[in-house]
């Protein structure tokens, strides 16, 4: 619990995580939620007012049902917070590309996730397992991906590492070797810089550790880690249930989670979450709204704007297009009032997941096109049926747009407008892109 005076002179008492002020996330931490919403509303108004030239209705922001512990997905990075310091597992320190601060007390995700992060860090730190260094591109541990469903309580954990087990153990260098390296760096420093420049710079210090191959085999260490996580459930430390524990390999130089091969250490490679009565199968890297309860409010509002209740009463069955459909959540939620609901998505993995989820929910009037939206609506969409046959997609009566953060390609936007549908709903995750796309 921290107590402080707000900048308006109002005395506030609230819970802040121990990383408040140094963590690169949670920009609004320390701000009352009502005030945060007011600031965000004003920010959106400032973007929309200059581009909407006619009177329009601006509805109040719909708040998240939960202010804390709401995220169903977190990606954590292995590293350290000081040179030669102990292993850390968490989030980037504010204004730092290299420093990683421990984040098991993070308050935006379920406490189960914090327990998993803490156990993982302590397990590998106890074995002196190395983390992947961004400068030298050497080391083993890279990321920990944790997804926990709010409705079902299922947990999916994925450890992301390199394949360099030969460099997976941190071993202290001898004092003699350290001093010899120190002399080498000093000689390089004096040769590299003039006396005037040297006065402004600091002589680099050598590493006190080197990377070697652990005594244990990789499979043994991973097995021990898996068992340490499962022990959390047995001891009642986590309330959720592990659906899968995975190990993903990634030797790509970029500091992103990339799947170059995944092994299942326990359970399965997916988990289930429920949204507005439908059940969705989610894989480690598939897109799904990170706030499950907030997503329900979002999708309920989308259905409202699309005239969902009116369509139910009237019994009309329009053709609905869900463009940039991702894993088909909106497509399926609109299917009960459609003759056909068509999702268009460029990521093939997401399209396959959408098809599987539609089958899981017993929805037969959903279909999905894997392709770029501009190309699909320019050349005409093709639907592949279960028997393998191909047919042309019918013209839409209603369109829902849910584009990525960069918004919609101008040419695609013109084609979408040319459909001249009665209703078009735009779901924007970046208001700046929405404002740009509204300009004629």
Image (tube, helix red, strand yellow):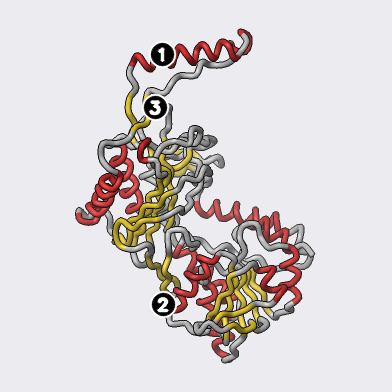
> Residue most toward the bottom?
315
x, y percent for residue 133 = 46, 35
How crowded pointer 2 is (Cα within 10 Å; few <14, some 14-19, many 20+) is rated as: few
Number of the label disc, if any, that sits on residue 84:
3
x, y percent for residue 145 = 41, 52
Q: Establish if 422 lies above or below 223.
A: below
Image quadrant for the C terminus?
bottom right
Q: Establish if 415 lies above or below 147.
A: below
Work out whether residue 418 can be spotted: yes
Secondary structure of the residue carrying numbered label 1: helix
Q: Earlier in the sequence, mark 3 or mark 2?
A: 3
Q: Earlier in the sequence, mark 1 or mark 3?
A: 3
Residue 377 picture quarter: bottom right
x, y percent for residue 122 = 29, 40
Instruction: Please indicate whether residue 436 sits to the left or right of residue 272 in the image.
Output: right
The residue that appears at 41% across and 34% down in the rendered structure is 80
> Mark 1 near mark 3, Cβ–Cβ under 8 Å?
no
Mark in front: 1 vs 2: 1
Q: Which residue is mark 1?
A: 180
What distance separates the C-alpha of mark 1 from that of mark 3?
A: 18 Å
The residue that appears at 59% across and 14% down in the rendered structure is 192
Number of the label disc, if any, that sits on residue 360:
2
Instruction: Please indicate whether residue 133 sits to the left or right of residue 170 in the image.
Output: right
């Amino acid at each position: 619990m921290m107590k402080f005076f707000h900048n308006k002179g109002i005395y506030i008492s609230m819970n802040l995580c121990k990383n408040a002020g140094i963590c690169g996330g949670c920009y609004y931490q320390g701000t009352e939620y009502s005030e945060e919403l007011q600031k965000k509303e004003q920010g959106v108004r400032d973007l929309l007012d200059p581009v909407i030239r006619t009177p329009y209705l601006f509805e109040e922001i719909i708040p998240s049902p939960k202010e804390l512990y709401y995220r169903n997905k977190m990606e954590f990075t292995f590293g350290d917070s000081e040179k030669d310091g102990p292993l850390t597992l968490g989030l980037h320190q504010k204004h730092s590309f290299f420093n990683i601060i421990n984040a098991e007390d993070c308050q935006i995700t379920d406490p189960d996730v914090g327990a998993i992060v803490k156990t993982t860090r302590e397990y590998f730190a106890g074995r002196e397992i190395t983390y992947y260094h961004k400068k030298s591109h050497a080391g083993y541990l890279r990321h920990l991906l944790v997804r926990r469903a709010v409705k079902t309580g299922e947990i999916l954990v994925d450890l992301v590492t390199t394949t360099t087990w030969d460099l997976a153990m941190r071993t202290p260098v001898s004092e003699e070797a350290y001093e010899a390296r120190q002399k080498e760096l000093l000689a390089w420093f004096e040769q590299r810089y003039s006396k005037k420049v040297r006065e402004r710079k600091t002589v680099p210090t050598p590493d006190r550790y080197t990377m070697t191959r652990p005594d244990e085999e990789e499979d043994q260490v991973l097995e021990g880690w898996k068992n340490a996580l499962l022990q959390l459930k047995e001891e009642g430390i986590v309330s959720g249930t592990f659906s899968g524990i995975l190990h993903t390999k990634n030797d790509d130089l970029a500091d992103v989670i990339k799947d170059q091969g995944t092994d299942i250490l326990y359970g399965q490679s997916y988990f289930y979450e429920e949204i507005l009565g439908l059940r969705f199968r989610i894989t480690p890297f598939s897109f799904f709204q990170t706030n499950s309860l907030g997503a329900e409010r979002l999708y309920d509002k989308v259905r409202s704007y699309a005239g969902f209740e009116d369509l139910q009463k009237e019994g009309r069955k329009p053709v609905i297009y869900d463009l940039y459909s991702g894993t088909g959540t909106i497509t399926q939620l609109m299917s009960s009032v459609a003759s056909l609901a068509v999702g268009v998505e460029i990521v093939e993995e997401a399209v396959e997941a959408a098809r599987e989820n539609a089958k899981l929910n017993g929805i037969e009037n959903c279909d999905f096109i894997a392709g770029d939206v501009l190309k699909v609506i320019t050349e005409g969409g093709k639907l592949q049926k279960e028997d393998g046959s191909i047919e042309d997609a019918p013209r839409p009566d209603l369109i829902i747009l849910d584009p990525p953060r960069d918004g919609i390609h101008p040419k695609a936007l013109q084609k979408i407008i040319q459909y001249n549908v009665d209703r078009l709903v735009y779901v924007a995750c970046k208001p700046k892109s929405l404002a740009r796309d509204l300009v004629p």
